[in-house]
Image: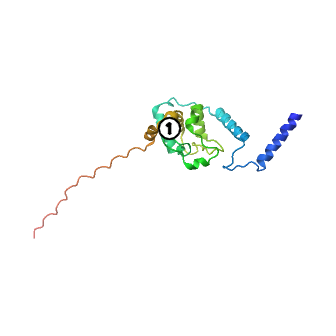
Amino acid sequence: ALIGALAIIVGLGAAVFFLGGFYSVAGTAEDPGIVRWALIQVRTASIKRHATDQPPANINDAQTVQAGAKAFAAYGCANCHGAPGVPWLKYSEGLHPDPPDLKKVVDHQTPAQLFWVVKNGINMTGMPSFELAGAKDEEIWAMAAFLKKLPTVSEADYKAWTAPPAAAPPAPPPAAQPVPSPPASNQ
């Protein structure tokens, strides 16, 4: 009975704290340790449970990794997460929680987990769903392939992989044709 009464009291206290507006949702406010811990636990468990898709056979191919780098750049991922030789933009510092440094976290995630996060996004973190942004599964798998290689990608490789294709040289102007002279008139 005592444990039940304590559970009810704790539940009511939490409800008053969160639903009564005492918990600040400001991006500048630090989360209490218990809230930070709970959000991390929920996020980790959710990703593990839902990330069940199997990666394609070409997940480790160099072309897939390079296509993933190109998609990573095209969808603006470097804006929040940075990339080799590309710092993240200042506004990403205003996101709460901070966007992770992907070089430090990708070794702890499977390709399926990275695919699921990129495809679906994560609520309350600023991480959008790239499926809703128009990315196809093939592009998202390529991004997962790139992310798994990210810790070893050099700045030069990233720049080469994400550079726009070289423009074709302009066609030479057509050769000048002699202008026929008007027929001479007999007067």
- In this view, the residue farthest toward the left is 187
Q: Could you tell me which secondary element the residue under label 1 belongs to?
A: helix
Q: Give residue 70's position: percent from left, percent from top.
A: 48, 41
Q: Give residue 65's position: percent from left, percent from top.
A: 48, 35
Q: Residue at x 88, y 34 (%)?
A: 2
Q: Give residue 11's position: percent from left, percent from top.
A: 81, 41
Question: In the image shown, does 153 or 116 lie closer to the viewer?
Answer: 153
Q: Look at the image and tell me in which quarter the C terminus lies.
A: bottom left
Q: Which residue is mark 1?
A: 68
Q: Give residue 167's position: percent from left, percent from top.
A: 37, 46
Left or right position of 28 against 90: right
Q: Residue at x 54, y 48 (%)?
A: 89
- In this view, the residue farthest toward the right is 1
Number of marks in picture: 1
Left or right position of 123 against 87: right
Q: Is residue 146 above or below residue 179?
A: above
Examine the image and state in which quarter residue 135 appears: top right
Q: Residue at x 83, y 43 (%)?
A: 12
Q: Is residue 1 above or below residue 164?
A: above
Q: Report the colour scheme.
A: rainbow
- In this view, the residue farthest toward the bottom is 187
Name the residue type under label 1: Gly
Examine the image and state in which quarter residue 163 appears: top left
Q: Residues within 10 Å of mark 1 (few under 14, many from 20)?
A: many
Q: Look at the image and tell me in which quarter the N terminus lies.
A: top right
Question: In the image shown, does 33 or 185 lie closer to the viewer?
Answer: 33
